[in-house]
Amino acid sequence: MKKLILTFLLFIILWEISKAQVVITKGTFPALCDGAAGYSNQLTDIIIAETNPTDFGIGSKSFTVVGVPYTVLNTGVGLVQFAVGGDITTGSISVCCNQIITINYTSPTNTKIDTIIIKGLQINAINNAPTSFDIKRQAGGSVINGFTTGQSVATIQADQNYAYFTLPISFCPNSAPYLLTTIAPTLTTGVFSGAGVIGNYFYPTLVSAGSHPITYTVGNACNTTATVSANIIPQKPLIVSNKTSICEGDVVTFTASSTGISYTFYKNNILVQGPSTNNKYTTNQFINSDSIFVACTYSGCTNYSDTISIPVNANPLVDFTISDYCAGKLP
């Protein structure tokens, strides 16, 4: 009977040992910024801990984790540590150029609980990363209870590092509010900012003429941004003359000094030239009561200058008479 009990207890012990396996704490990554040149961050520790002293085995051992389908590991960066007081006496790590991480260790005995800690792995940004992918154990290497081929030791989450939106070439000063929208696959959780921006709208009437940067910041750990400038056409073109005053019949030239692709000149509210690309109007038919202004069209915006006039001086009147005189006599 006693022998039967001992056999049963031994069976239970062996059964529990056969069920023992390592516990893996997976490494995590805050955000892999897709396509962000020069961006890198550190993977949290990967911890592989025995639950039974025999899980790692005896002797010189090794295993490889790989399965990273993208070039994200920073070659040569990383280290391995082992729990103090365990069976493992020495060990090393190799982070190779082909994204393979090899762990070597020596365990002369298997009487104590051991823990392998993989630290400091650097993850670099890549292009076109999927939403997430794993670093997994590769086939081959030493047998470790509960750590099999294809088992994941780290999951990498990829944040979209893409921010893109466009604006019209320019805005008229009195344009209606413009809805700002991103272009896929830009995340829509970001925020627009800049002068004249309220929420997702840009208000041209709130800013002056000129260029105003608008920025979209993606709402993720990558803090990705995109900036596009909104160009506001000057509200009122300028018109100047090349003379401050003239005499009747003198030639005078009026010039529109604002940028445009089309100019139309009006004298006394009557069209006299244009629309054309010529920003100058020359005439010798200008009197004191005349006035002139110009309409400047650019990128679909038509704006009107102030009306100007210049003094026109009347020409002097010259008159003389001729009397009859006899030849050779003075008047």
Image (cartoon, grey):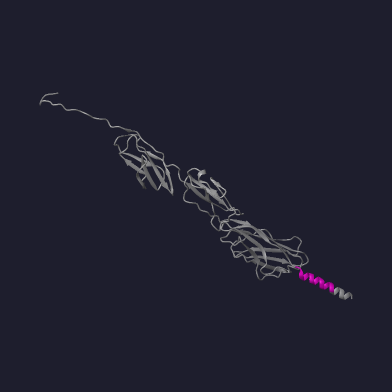
- Between 295 and 44, which is closer to the camera in this rendering? 295
Q: Quadrant of the N terminus?
A: bottom right
- Indicate left or right for 77 with 177 as reference: right
Q: In this view, does 46 lie above or below 304?
A: below
Q: Position of residue 27 (x, y in %)?
A: 67, 60
Q: In which quarter of the image is the C terminus?
A: top left
- Between 302 and 217, which is closer to the camera in this rendering? 302
Does residue 19 show up magenta in the picture?
yes
For the point 79% across and 71% down, the residue is: 15
Hey, which quadrant is residue 313 in on the image? top left
- Indicate left or right for 269 with 110 as reference: left
For the point 40% across and 44% down, the residue is: 295
- Between 106 and 141, which is closer to the camera in this rendering? 141
For the point 83% across and 72% down, the residue is: 10
- Indicate left or right for 18 with 185 as reference: right
Give the total number of marks visible in the rendering: 0
In the displayed image of the protein, which residue is found farthest to the right? 1
Q: Position of residue 224 (x, y in %)?
A: 57, 53
Q: Position of residue 175 (x, y in %)?
A: 49, 47
- Indicate left or right for 121 with 263 as reference: right
Magenta stretch mostly in which secondary structure? helix
Q: In this view, does 330 lie above or below 245?
A: above
Q: Where is residue 121 in the image (x, y as percent from the top left)?
A: 64, 59
The stretch in magenta equals 8-20
Does residue 146 show up magenta in the picture?
no
- Between 103 and 211, which is closer to the camera in this rendering? 211
In the displayed image of the protein, which residue is found farthest to the left? 327
